[in-house]
Amino acid sequence: MKERLNLDISPEKSKIVNLKHDYSDFLGFRIKVHKGKKNKYVIISHIAPKALEKIKEKAKEKVTKIQFCSGQLEEYQAVNDYNSFVMGIHNYYCMATCANPDMQTLAYEIKISIKNRLQERVKRRTEEPIPEYAKRYSKSKEIRFVGKTILLPIGYIQHHPPIHKKKAINKYTVEGRAEIHKNLESVDMTVLHILMRNPIAGASIEYKDNRLSLYAAQHGTCAITKQILSVEEIHCHHKTPKSQGGGDEYANLIILHKNVHKLVHATQRDTISAILQKVQLKPAELKKLNSLRKLAGNEAIVPEQMNLPVAD
């Protein structure tokens, strides 16, 4: 590199490593391959020690900032800044196979720092609701609150393997563009453009964007019946209602046929009976519908009790 391209390199970062014998640090990760089952090599990855040290220092700085806040608004902003830092670290390092045990090496120290600096200001979870953005931490016993603001546990990180799109998908090659167009063939672009030009009045930008994304992801069909939907039939449903703390994020939305959407919320026996006669759900479809009704706080529909036939 130096001789042929006249580029300076770092001996610490630039070297040739046999990953079967030694670890290699790259972008905050420490990587090595191990022989697993059936003699296949698998990657074992850690958070690099230098990265862990930086995380610890940064986390302590943010805890100190919370300690010296002068008012409720400043405290609220400082706690949310700490939470953003924790979520950013978790989102980046969750692909490391040993992310959880690595983070535990510093989590205890951060926990002690929080306890010593914030003292009685930190309380265990009681009746305070978990905000939607922090639902993935709801099972952690280390959740704390500063006032009414949640303080996310830095040690609660779960490994998630990275999932990439197909290598063939590439807008810069003829073959790659063909793959993109192939994926769009099942989506009615006319309907998609109508949805883009006619957003739901009063809805958030997140809701409007996710509504379009879901329509494309579901290939323009109802999630329950798999029926291709016209513009008038498209309803975007909140799985957990906003009245119960549900948000507009992608995971909480689903595209349904308008009649199926009515069934999710219907409570009157006559209304349910009339719609079921039109829709004719199969047992598997009815099971999916009932799971949505349960999330919406409604009882399951049992056709036998209403003397209604179930589609084969």
Image (cartoon, helix red, strand yellow):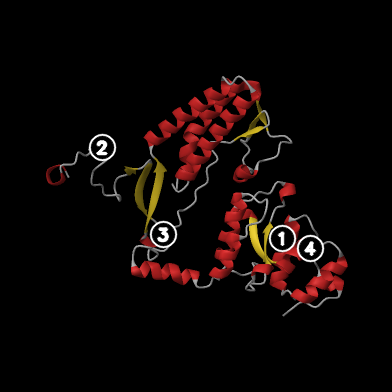
Amino acid at dot 4: Ala
Q: CA gap, disc 3 to disc 2?
A: 33 Å
Q: Around disc 4, counting alpha carbons within 10 Å, would you say few (fewer than 14), some (14 to 19), or many (20 or more)?
A: some
Q: CA gap, disc 4 to disc 1?
A: 9 Å
Amino acid at dot 3: Lys
Q: CA gap, disc 3 to disc 4?
A: 44 Å
**In this figure, which residue is indicated by the disc labeled 4?**
300
Amino acid at dot 2: Glu
**In this figure, which residue is indicated by the disc labeled 3?**
37
Label 1 residue SS: helix
* Residue at screen point 49% across, 26% down: 60
Label 4 residue SS: loop
Q: Around disc 2, counting alpha carbons within 10 Å, would you say few (fewer than 14), some (14 to 19), or many (20 or more)?
A: few
Q: CA gap, disc 4 to disc 2?
A: 62 Å
* For marks 4 and 1 on the same chain, the one whose residue lies earlier in the sequence: 1
Front tag of 2 and 1: 1
Label 3 residue SS: helix
Q: CA gap, disc 2 to disc 1?
A: 54 Å
**In this figure, which residue is indicated by the disc labeled 2?**
12
